[in-house]
Amino acid sequence: FTLDEINLSNKMIDLWTSFAKTGVPTSDSSSVRWEKYTNNDKSYININIKELKMEKNSSGKACDLYDLTINTTVGALFL
């Protein structure tokens, strides 16, 4: 793994660990605060090898695949 990949992995570990402990995903290695996604705000975190940054998705398309996958998977569990 490259140093950038290791750093990204460590940030993801920090985010998931913080979320499991507190319900708020934060990372000591990043100053980004992960904002709650709402239908009005549509904030999400862009996670890539160089940086973590909050972005807004006014069209909601960034979550369409996720919504489709979750709805299909969860729906199949209860059929």
Image (tube, rainbow, N blue to C red):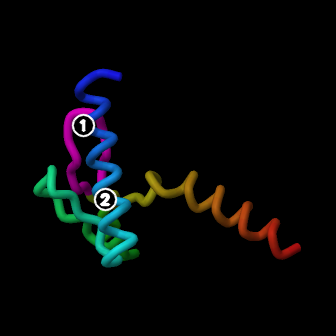
List the residue tagged with mark 2: 15
Frontmost residue, 79 versus 16 = 16
Q: Secondary structure at mark 2?
A: helix
Q: Which mark is residue 59?
A: none
> Pointer 2: residues within 10 angstroms few (<14), some, or many (20+)?
some
Where is the N terminus found, in terms of image quarters?
top left
User: Is residue 50 within the magenta segment?
Assistant: yes
Kindly give the residue lying farthest to the top in the view shown: 2
Q: Residue type at mark 1: give it.
A: Asn
Residue at x-position 15% and y-position 50%: 29
Q: Position of residue 30 (x, y in %)?
A: 15, 52
Contact (CB < 8 A) between labels 2 and 1?
no
Q: Which mark is residue 7?
A: 1
Q: Secondary structure at mark 1?
A: helix
Residue at x-position 31% and y-position 73%: 36
Residue at x-position 88% and y-position 73%: 79
Q: Quadrant of residue 51?
A: top left
In magenta, the rendered stretch is: 45-55
